Image (cartoon, coloured by chain):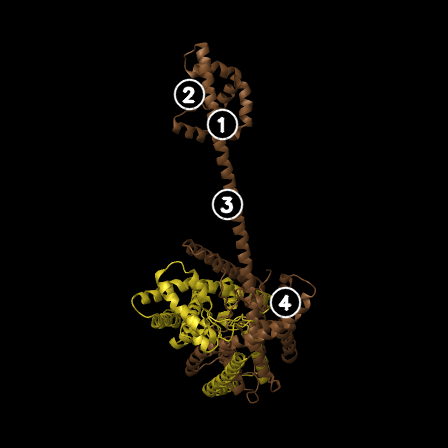
Chain colours: A yellow, B brown
Amino acid sequence: MHSVGRSWLLLTGFILFYIIYLLFGALVFSSIERPVEDKLRQDMEDLKQEFLNQSCVNAASLELFLVKVLTANKYGVSVLKNSTATSNWDLASSMFFANTLVTTVGYGHTTPLSDTGKAFSILYALIGVPFTMLVLTACVQRLMYPLVLAPVSLLHRSGMEPRPATIVHFVLLVVLVLLLFFVAPAAVFSAVEMSWSFLDGIYFCFISLCTIGLGDFVPGTQPGQTYRALYQVAVMVYLFVGLMMMYLLLRTFHKMADLHGLTTFLQLPRCEESDLDEDREPIVDDQREDQRPSYQTQKGASKPLEPGSQPSYNTINKG
Amino acid sequence: MAAPDLLDPKSAAHNSKPRLSFSAKPVLLNTPNDDDDDCDTRTTVMRWKTVSAIFFLVVLYLIIGATVFKALEQPYESYEKLVILEKKLDFLVMHGCVNSSELEDLVKQVVSAVRKGVNPSGNSTNQQSLWDISSSFFFAGTVITTIGFGNISPHTEGGKIFCVIYALLGIPLFGFLLAGVGDQLGTIFGKGIARVEKMIVKWKVSQTKIRVFSTLLFILFGCLIFVALPAVIFKHIEGWSTLDSIYFVVITLTTIGFGDFVAGEKAGSESPDYLDYYKPVVWFWIMVGLAYFAAVLSMIGDWFRVISKKTKEEVGEFRAHAAEWTANVSAEFKETRRRLSVDIYDKFQRAASIKRKLSSELGINTSINQEMTPGKRTLSVNLYEDREACHNLTLSLSPVTGALTRNGSLYLNGLSPDYADRREIAIIENLK
């Protein structure tokens, strides 16, 4: 009973903390963005007024026109002169769209207009999202070996204790991923895209790789983009590989947290994968034997702390 | 087992459960290839093959999706383009003092303002700010759940940097929360399903059927509460069509979050008076619905895995059967060859002894060739028919003769192994 009460308490604690975190974020965003928004609004008013003053257009018809233009623009159809040539639904862009759908990034710079398109998107997503997750996880499982376990055993062999070795390796991995998947692509994007700064590039990389996908920056959508199809395919590949690396990082972190007993302390689901992995690792024999006792003693020691193997819906696990 | 039952406590021990990742994304960690690892070195080769096969499938899936989307959407898009161009021309015609470059300018500025979240149409006085507390709260929520609608997004440098840091900390936090909520949800569902199962057990239905039934019940019930009901509510409050409401629900709960439809954030031009508790309820629904959807998606993924495992099992079984069959056939083959070789050896022995007798009786001391030739000629006609019938045995004879020559035992009385022919044997038998 005590453990059940404790898990409820923890959950409530999490929810409260989450709400507080959201409120905090709301306050900060509000205070940063609101003044800028007000100024922009004022500018727009002035612009409209200026336009109306110097022409014979009356306010009502301008409003009507603007509303129509903006509705069309929301779906990615632009009325500007130089954007008539490129379509948002040619093959490469459609594939880019399908990719954003399936990786759940969902930029929203182009969205399905027709009813059939929406219905198809629903079906496509319901099948494609778990499928993609499966692929990503499979790839991460394979990559775990050369990128995580082998280096850790290497470090261990060179005399380090397993726990510091995992920390050192994790830090190295984070730095590597940051350089390769954030800094370098951001530099490329800020060079290729006309209006993006370096910060915008990093912001875009982060928002995409966390699959948030706000959609305020989308590469390859500027009119007059050369090699657009190739560019979009390259961005797709970058997204996919980047997502894989993020999952790899998360997995490594979770295993590390497991090893250091964090997950049991917070009564979070364990990375039970590790049991299966270790049992079937075929290649590195000696080091695994060395490490296995330490892992297992960790687990053995921490088992009584767990809130009983929850006989119920223990499906949602982490890492 | 037809479908993995998530909620059956008995199966908790030995079923591999679908799991979620650290972040709020449904990630399956039990990949389809865990089970074909036999802990030998060959598995590393197999693993990459399977992974690349799946990867190829995903690329194929994307290409198929791309062609379908293109076919569905491009005509619509061209139509919309024509419509809006027409309107632009109408506007220019109607208001002759506006030239098209001025209009272009205005439109460009308006569009970029809208992208920044400011809608210049309508009066600016009664417009709700996009960054008041409740909307900012909603935005923070969309960032942390990784839905990311995008109808609001930060435009200042400070906002962007803060957004990055905020997400870095918030996404794992939300992941924990989701895991916790999912667990509680599962407990509730599990208790309900257990009760239902207890009722059904009285009818003496098989375990598999119970599991399938309870999974279906889980899906149906969840769909009702988290998809159908909210869709109806959105349709009523936001004024969307049925398809649009369902579309919004699915796109939000899978965390794709396009942002073309957002509940509670009408484009800002008209602010319908939402009830005070509308937005918090929407946020709560998103949270619980995400947990449900994660479970559903991981269940679908689990089914993929079960199917692939089954296919693999069947293929494996088939392969095992084929291997067994091949082994049996070759064993039989060897057995037949062995028997035949013994047979032939016996026959040769007998033939040799007969020849010895004949030669001693007839006093002929010539080579076998010449002796056999008259016999051959007379009997060759009969033998061809026999030869046809026993065609398959000739295959076995040639290696057999090889085996016999190794022993060298056939060189009795000069009987060369080249003449170990069916015809010779028939002649010999006839001669007996």
Instruction: Assign a secondary structure to mark 1.
Output: helix
Q: Which residue is mark 3?
A: B323
Viewport quadrant of the N terminus of chain B: bottom right
Observer-side mark, 4 or 1, equals: 1
Q: Are marks 4 and 2 in contact (CB under 8 Å)?
A: no
Amino acid carrying label 3: it is: Ala
Does residue A244 sit above or below A18 in this rendering? Answer: above
Q: Are marks 4 and 3 in contact (CB under 8 Å)?
A: no
Q: Is residue A256 among what the camera can see?
A: yes
Return the x and y of residue A14 as percentages of the image width and height. 50, 81
Q: Which residue is mark 2?
A: B415
Return the residue nearer the eye: A314 or A88: A314
- Point out the tag, 1 or 3, that comes first from the N-terminus: 3
Chain under disc 2: B
Q: CA distance from mark 1 to mark 3?
A: 29 Å
Instruction: Assign a secondary structure to mark 3.
Output: helix
Instruction: Assign a secondary structure to mark 4.
Output: helix
- Point out the tag, 2 or 3, that comes first from the N-terminus: 3
Q: Are marks 1 and 2 in contact (CB under 8 Å)?
A: no
